[in-house]
Amino acid sequence: MVTPASGGRGSSVTRLPPVPRWSPSTDREVRAATGDRVRLLTDADTAALAALSARAPVSNVFVDSLLEAGRLAGPRGGAAGTLFLGIDDDAPGAGALRAAVWIGSNVVPVAASEAPDAGWAPGDAEALGAAAAALRRRYGSIYGPAGPVLAAGEALAAAGHRSRSVRADQPLLVLGAAGGIDPNPYVVQAQPRDFARVLPASAAMFEEELGFSPFAGGAAQYRDRVERLIHAGRVFIDPGPRDAGGPLRFKADIGLLSSRCAQIQGVWMAPAARGRGLAASAMAAVVDYVRLQAPVVSLYVNAYNTPALRTYERVGFERRGTFATVLY
């Protein structure tokens, strides 16, 4: 019996234990599915998780951005919330993590190196994939270093998660020496007043890349993300002729940002402007902005997108690794 805390003088109050932010069975489930190899991380693992993430700042820009914003390693948001799973370094006295994944609507490996295998030990990716499957969730994708992504994807497939597309070769590019391309002087940071023109450009890029509309499951969440990026000064546009008032000519975002790396995403050129050599100068302008916010500028692209690869090479990007994406 619980006496309400608002009871009168002399009333006793029995305090309930804190409501867990995750099911108490979560850790048991992932341990059981992986022979005790994988465990649920807690807030006490935050320093170890940050140390692991720091070993590959380009591959781990997503996780770095979360940790720098104050996210701790423990579960957040209830049974359907976000969490980290990890594998402890078994070296004597290590007290560290050797591999981890972030679990939310997507699955994101936390790399131990920038190599395509993420520096993980053999079997780690399969174990973390099996652990993700044991949570009995639906995922939108797995993305990150190719080795862990593809191996974890196979483990999820074995558990019944059917992929609709596998992008096994996505060059991870990092800006090297400037490519000598004059930046487009008309590229500017988008302002809140530009939202009505940025949103359809963002949606067009999303649909071209993923094959379905970002509004298919409801528009509010996607609209909010675009608005947040604009208000953070992380959307760059070529508005086209000022008197036209029509679609943008070009758009790109800083999709992810940490103190060590910025990842450019959402690059889109209006169909009418394609094939005219305009993308390189627009990207050169974006890069000039982005380098003011992070010491390393990166992006990844599908290997089959030859025109985009050539554009990025002209701007000065160099291949440093390989990502992969499994879409569900």
Image: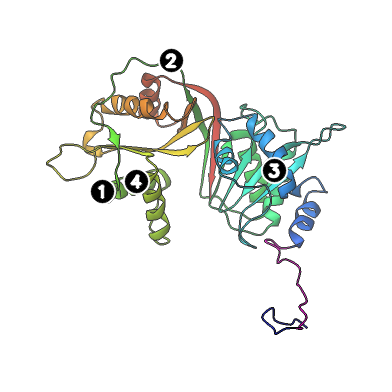
Disc 1, disc 3: CB below 8 Å? no
Q: Which of marks 1 and 4 is nearer the N terminus?
A: 1
Q: Mark 1 is on which residue type?
A: Arg
Q: Mark 4 is on which residue type?
A: Ser
- Is label 2 or label 3 in front? 3
Q: What stretch is highlighted in magenta?
A: 10-23
Disc 2, disc 1: CB below 8 Å? no
For label 4, the residue is 202
Mark seen at residue 177: 2
For label 1, the residue is 193
- Is label 4 or label 3 in front? 3
Mark 2, other Cα within 10 Å: few <14 / some 14–19 / many ≥20: few
Tell me which residue sits at (51%, 29%) in the image: 172
Q: Which of marks 4 and 3 is nearer the N terminus?
A: 3
Q: Earlier in the sequence, mark 2 or mark 4?
A: 2
Where in the figure is residue 3, as x and y percent of width and height?
Answer: 74, 82
For label 3, the residue is 46
Q: Distance between the residues labelled 2 and 1?
A: 35 Å
* Residue at disc 1, secondary structure: helix
Q: How far apart are marks 2 and 3 (CA)?
A: 35 Å
Where in the figure is residue 82, as x and y percent of width and height?
Answer: 61, 54
Q: Distance between the residues labelled 4 and 3?
A: 34 Å
Mark 1, other Cα within 10 Å: few <14 / some 14–19 / many ≥20: few
Q: Mark 3 is on which residue type?
A: Thr
* Residue at disc 4, secondary structure: helix
Q: Distance between the residues labelled 1 and 3?
A: 39 Å
Vertical order, 309 against 164 (above or below): above
